[in-house]
Amino acid sequence: NAIHGFLAALPKCEHHMHLEGSLSPELLFELSARNKVALPSPETEDPAFASVETLYERYRNFTSLDDFLHYYYIGFTVLLHESDFEALAYAYFTRAASEGVRHAEVFFDPQVHIDRGIAYETMVNGFTSARRRAEADLGITSLLVPCLLRHLPVPASLACFTTMREAGHFRDGTLAGLGLCSTEKDRPPHMWEEVYGLAAKEGIRLTAHAGEEGPAAYISEALDTLAVTRIDHGVNARLDEGVMERLASQRTMLSVCPLSNVVLRVVTKVAEVPIRTFLDKGVPFSINSDDPAYFGGYILDNYCAVQDAFGLSVAEWRTIARNAVEGSWCTEERKEVIF
Ligand code: ADE
Ligand code: ZN
């Protein structure tokens, strides 16, 4: 397919990729052995952990966001040392650069690591050194964005935000913004209004996962109560004409993750992701991999899946690529070099 070659060469920006979501079953077993961290027993706890193959097979059969998150957070347990975080992030940057990603804004979930006794500095130092090395060796620029977690109590988000702010990491650029992820149902965005308000006062860039499993109303609520300038996922905007029009008129970028949406059963097939509608109505979006090790594809697989479902023109792909560059949080100078 000739256009797949074109898509591979297209300069890409990725805005929705959880570093922990790039932990492959191979690396999971390797780190489990090296760090002497036991995984669930395949005999008595979960047969999926029998081998790399059975785990991949289980990943192909997620039934919901929460079903995925269960495995995703088990993956965290094998990450102990700064070098583990460094290796995880560097492997992602290598793969992304090989698929034409020039700039990546990557998420991580500090709360879960802190709660299991990993020092905040351990993960941040590991990720930061991978970012520096990847920029020097591969020419890929990146920004690091922590996500607060919706399945944990709101005061825990406040405490984590305070730790990051007091480290001076929003001011010195170690952290480029603030996100919100994890379980969406029954955890409406307004619950995080206080934390986001504190972040907004410091001029921190804000985004949040909304409208993935949750209703389109959570997208408007995130815009209204959290003052986010970007929405992660946002596919359920397709269920509400008013939300769709608002996103278009405000030019709020959605970081869409097509293969993730299929694997987590947000849609039944990629063709149900409203790519055509977004293009026709002028809703800016980027195409992303979310948790590539769990959802069967990195960014280029997502671009190709969209192409196979929608048969877009070269001009439409250029629009998508340009919108992704424009919606990035990098400097204007960097944007000009990329596109
Ligand atoms: N954390 C990692 N991936 C996620 C997703 N797709 N939705 C919500 N939280 C997540
Ligand atoms: Zn996500």
Image (tube, helix red, strand yellow):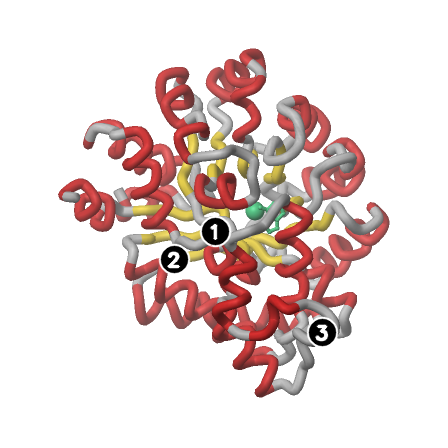
User: In the figure, is residue 339 to the left or right of 142?
Assistant: left
Q: Position of residue 321 (x, y in %)?
A: 31, 37
Please name whichever residue, 84 or 103, is drawn nearer the observer in this view of the structure.
Answer: 84
Q: Secondary structure at mark 2?
A: strand
For marks 2 and 3 on the same chain, the one whose residue lies earlier in the sequence: 3
For marks 3 and 1 on the same chain, the one whose residue lies earlier in the sequence: 1
Instruction: Name the disc covering residue 105, or none.
Output: 1
Distance between the alpha carbons at the discs numbered 2 and 1: 9 Å
Q: Is mark 3 in CB contact (under 8 Å) with mark 1?
A: no
For marks 2 and 1 on the same chain, the one whose residue lies earlier in the sequence: 1
Distance between the alpha carbons at the discs numbered 3 and 1: 23 Å
Q: Is residue 193 visible?
A: no
The CB of the residue at mark 3 lies under 8 Å from ligand 1: no
Residue corresponding to mark 2: 141
Residue corresponding to mark 3: 118
| Residue type at the position of mark 2 | Thr
The residue lying at 60 percent from left, 66 percent from top is: 48
Q: Is residue 224 visible?
A: yes
Q: Position of residue 255 (x, y in %)?
A: 48, 38
Please name whichever residue, 65 or 255, is drawn nearer the observer in this view of the structure.
Answer: 65
Looking at the image, residue 163 lies above or below residue 152: below
Q: Position of residue 20 (x, y in %)?
A: 57, 62
User: In the figure, is residue 86 to the left or right of 94?
Assistant: right
| Residue type at the position of mark 3 | Ile
Q: Position of residue 122 (x, y in %)?
A: 64, 74
Which quadrant of the structure image shows residue 91?
bottom left
**Quadrant position of the C terminus in the picture:** top left
Distance between the alpha carbons at the discs numbered 2 and 3: 26 Å
Q: Secondary structure at mark 3?
A: loop
The residue lying at 44 percent from left, 39 percent from top is: 258
Which quadrant of the structure image shows residue 37?
bottom right
Which quadrant of the structure image shows residue 118?
bottom right
